[in-house]
Image (cartoon, rainbow, N blue to C red):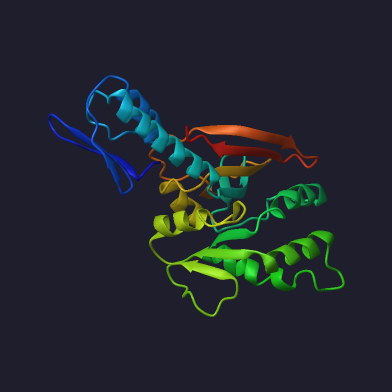
Amino acid sequence: MWPDIETISSRNSAVLRFGARRIKPSFSSKYLTLVKKAGSSSGRTNIKFQHCVKPSSLAVIEKTVANHRQQKSQMRKIISFMHMSLDGFVAGPNGEMNWIKVDEEIFDYVGNRINESDTALYGRVTYEMMENYWPTAGDGPTASKHDIEHSKWYKKAHKIVLSKTMKNEGFTNTTIINDNLSDTINEIKQQPGSEIALFGSPTATHSLIQLNLIDGYWLFVNPIILGEGIPLFANIKDKTKLKLLTTRQFTCGVIELNYTVDRQ
């Protein structure tokens, strides 16, 4: 989605706006195709005229679009990391997750990628679960290798929490987002850092999907059909094209599907 590219059109003229910059083109025939390609990841476009600019103006537009695309490609990405059933549920009707299969093979595989990230994103409920366990999970004498490694990572990672009830005070290395979700997330994406791992958090995930803010889906499909529960995708109105980056089958029967959102 390119919210900062828009056109203002009238009967005989049009203005193309890139953020604060406006270009009033004269008409020729190449322009519509160019801007439709840049207009929106979902294929929608707000171009209302059917002619194009002269080569001199076109060069300015092409350069501006190219710069914008480069900035977009350099932005941090939000990756939804989720376990799910074969029929698309991420939890049972009451939030049950005892059907999820995890073992050392999966822990090691997931840990290799998570350790490269410096930021975790949660909904309030998931964050409270994580905060009640991970800060001290690696301290006990019976702590597993995974507990020790992920506890260490969790304490260092910056946490972002989506919540309408929590206040953004009294937390260490944690940002609470109560409102202005789209603007705030886009600001965070433009800050230096690695990809942002969205752990579980189906309600937060649904909100981010609706705003087209998720850039990839790292899914672990479990060999089970739940029949009912909390779905990964809900109230989807627009098509989203995906590219499959990697897939892997684990010994326990879980299959990894690693997708990136195709914004071309």
**Residue 41 seen in render:** no
Given residues 252 and 213, the one toward you in this image is: 213
Q: Is residue 116 above or below residue 125?
A: above
Question: Residue 5 location in percent, x, y?
Answer: 33, 41
Q: Residue furthest top?
A: 29
* Residue at 52% over, 65% down: 161
Given residues 66 and 178, the one toward you in this image is: 66
Q: Residue furthest bottom?
A: 170
Image quadrant of residue 134?
A: bottom right
Labels in figure, total: 0
Question: Residue 198 location in percent, x, y?
Answer: 58, 54
Q: Residue furthest right?
A: 141
Relative to 240, is 6 on the left or the right? left
Relative to 97, is 149 on the left or the right? right
Question: Residue 243 location in percent, x, y?
Answer: 57, 32
Relative to 225, is 213 on the left or the right? left
| Quarter containing the N terminus | top left
**Residue 62 seen in render:** yes
Q: Is residue 249 above or below residue 173?
A: above
Given residues 111 and 251, the one toward you in this image is: 111
Q: Residue furthest left?
A: 11
Given residues 143 and 231, the one toward you in this image is: 143
Image quadrant of residue 238?
A: top left
* Residue at 57% over, 49% down: 80
Image quadrant of residue 132?
A: bottom right
* Residue at 74% over, 73% down: 136
Question: Residue 228 location in percent, x, y?
Answer: 53, 47
